[in-house]
Amino acid sequence: MVIAAALIAAVVLFLERVEQRPDDSGDRRGLGKGTPKKASTAKPPGRKLKPAPPDIGHPGRSVAIIIDDIGYDLQIVKELAGLPAPIAFAVLPHTPHAVEAAELFHAAGKEILLHLPMEPRSYPEGSPGEGALMADMDAGEIRRRIRENLAEVPFALGVNNHMGSRFMEDEARLAVVMEELRTKGLFFVDSLTTDNSRGRELAGRARVRFAARDVFIDYAPGYAVALESLTGIFRQGRKNGTPVLMIGHPHMETVRAIRDVLPIWRKKGVKVIPVSACLRIPGGAGKQDPFIKNRHNDKPASERKALHDPDICP
């Protein structure tokens, strides 16, 4: 009996000690029952906040650039072809390097236009060059010259006028040009060398895709003028989202200005687009052109002449 009682007492004592041992299950599976929880440092779940958009200044604004008068200097052609933007190039026919320049730009993935010479009001003092369309030509001669000039500029997708302040006002002869372009599937960009251009109206009649120049980048020589023109788009107040179409010339100062403005435009949210993205078929005379006028073309011709004669490349 004594032995049995001692054994029972020993078993009871052992069980009491086991119940008092700390539970380490919390180290393996979390906190055990009855153990106080540590304060959590995790943030309560909630809606994620989107980062604030960057300040781009002018969202959705776009610019297209054409460089005219290509064909005389291959070195500057190489400089221009290396610009990291979809700039278009208007090549003058019958120039020493017209074909080579067009081939180089085509290989670089750039758009090419025929820079079609046309008679200016200053003729004969101001000569538009070989292959020009003149105001005394008949329809057959106009068509023949267009075809010859196109053969001089391979890969041309469209045409813009070189000089042409007189020819672009001649409705009958300009209508022949537009009909010829329509048959060939080419577009037309009006350089707006005259306030009385019939380009938009006649392009609409012929159902030719069309755009018009807004700004001459280098209306006067020098880097400062070109850079001011390129950055001036931020002050033009355009609200309808249509692109600004700018025309420049193959001067090293202009190339430098374009190269310098590209990162500024990127920061401001301005996108450089191909000229082909600016085209539309005009609705006819009287419909508002989607492109704003150049600030110099807003002035009377007598005042504008002192700043820049659009028929003469600066």
Image: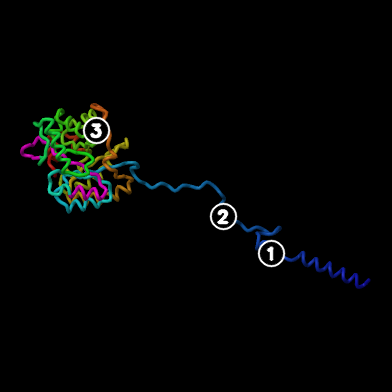
* Magenta region: 100-127
Image location (x, y in percent) of residue 151: 17, 42
User: Where's residue 168, x and y in %?
Assistant: 15, 33
Of labels 3 and 1, earlier in sequence is 1
Disc on res. 42:
2
Is 314 magenta? The answer is no
* Residue that badge 3 annotates: 208
Q: Residue at x 80, y 66 (%)?
A: 15
Give, as a three-letter code, the residue at label 3. Answer: Val
Please report contact status of discs 3 and 2: CB closer than 8 Å, yes or no.
Answer: no
Q: Nearer the viewer, residue 176 or 21?
A: 176
Dot 1 corresponds to which residue? 24
The percent position of residue 50, horizontal first and vertical second, equals: 46, 47
Q: Between residue 242 and residue 226, name the one nearer to us.
A: 242
Name above or below for residue 48 compared with residue 3: above
How many other residues sit within 10 Å of disc 2, few (<14), some (14-19) or many (≥20)? few
